[in-house]
Amino acid sequence: MIKKLKIAIVSDLHCTDNIDRRAITRLHPDTPGIPTVRHPVEALKTLIKKDQLEVDILLCPGDIADQVNKIGYHSGWRYVEEIANALNAKSIFATLGNHDVASRAEKPEQAFSVAKTLKTNYPVISPSDQKEFWADNFTVIEEEQYRLLIFNSVHDHFNTTTSKKVSIDEATLEKIKERLEKTDKSKIGIAMSHHHPTNHSNADFSDSDFIDKGDKLLKLLNEYAFSLYIHGHKHEPMLRTLNDVSILCAGSFSCLENLNETESENMFHIVEIFDHKGIVKSWDYGPVSGWHINNSSSGFPNITGYGFKGEINDLASAINDWMIKKNIEISNLRLLKEDIDAISFLRPDQQQDLQNKLISDFSIEVLPGIRCGDKASINKQIN
């Protein structure tokens, strides 16, 4: 029996009432709710109602606040709760980002004072899971359908020096291994932290704040049948695979920093998981159009996936054979996926590879692209 789980991801809100920092985020404690299109949360609730979106759980990979702004922290978490309620999510789970910690506090114990007193259901629901999270820098939540590992990647960000590096030590890796040994490997496995477990550089930015020994963590997660790792922090959505674990960097829900340099927009994600593979649906936000599907050829796809294990060449051949068998020259991606569902689980780079192979070997075009999902057409070019 295939196990299914649907999760929403709301990351990097950077909510603040700091006058000097208001321009870096769309979300403030006093952001007017009318017109709804200009308020990211109200606009999202409108989309949720219109499209009847529902999820099982909501994940928040950190940076709820901006520069640990206390009012922004409380308001940001309230916004997260509003979104979860609109989605009928059964649970909310979060972790801390670097902006959720007072890394320049006078005393180390003050660094996490706001986070530890925010609310009884933050960052996780169960008191025992909270105790484990604060004591061991991680917790593992196991429910009927899934196992969720949450790592606190800012656990030692209590002064300027320690906050310059992100790491997971061997002792913590050993504790995680011992904890995972007690879980049911047949359940869906998801991991989450704020920082990324492997390099996330692009053409404009170097990358020095990924988790040291993150590759060992990914290897361990693969050993215990985890297939998806979710993080925030970079404000640039990306999906790739390392050590057989798919790594999804969530886009920023409402922060404006770094967006111009990365061709990214504010984003909201829903991931539909089927055992060890999944479909990632994403919406972009704009203050004029609200939350909408991005059908352009740039940025992160509005629909993509992970977990495809086959060969792109074989998939391209199967699509060509499908068109020959159907005796058609024009169709659409929705009909094709009904017979060849592997297309749904292609990462963005694999989507592009398949399109290139289809046009070069079989003169088949996908317009405007696989990234556009059911709106895409399949056309056989006739010379």
Image (cartoon, rainbow, N blue to C red):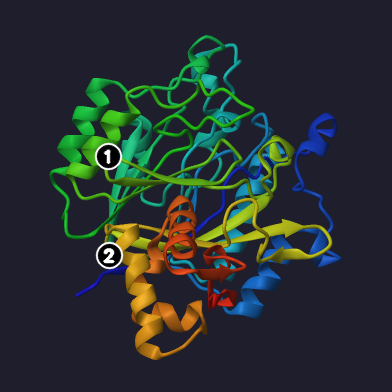
Q: Quadrant of the N terminus?
A: bottom left
Type of amino acid at the residue the image marks with label 1: Asn
Q: Mark 1 falls on what kind of element? A: loop
Q: Is residue 314 left or right of residue 360?
A: left
Considering only vertical position in the picture, is 196 above or below 7?
above
Rendering quarter of residue 135: top left
Q: Closer to the camera, 65 or 51? A: 51
Q: Mark 2 falls on what kind of element? A: loop
> Residue 180: image x %, image y %?
19, 43
> Residue 57: image x %, image y %?
44, 62
Whether residue 203 is visible: yes
Q: Closer to the camera, 234 or 360? A: 360
- In the current view of this chain or complex, which residue is farthest to the bottom? 327
Instruction: Identify residue for label 2.
Output: 145
Residue at figure coordinates x 56%, y 52% from the top left: 10
Whether residue 7 is visible: no
Instruction: Identify residue for label 1.
Output: 243
Q: Is residue 331 left or right of residue 342?
A: right
Q: Is residue 72 left or right of residue 120?
A: right
Please give the label number shown on residue 257.
Answer: none
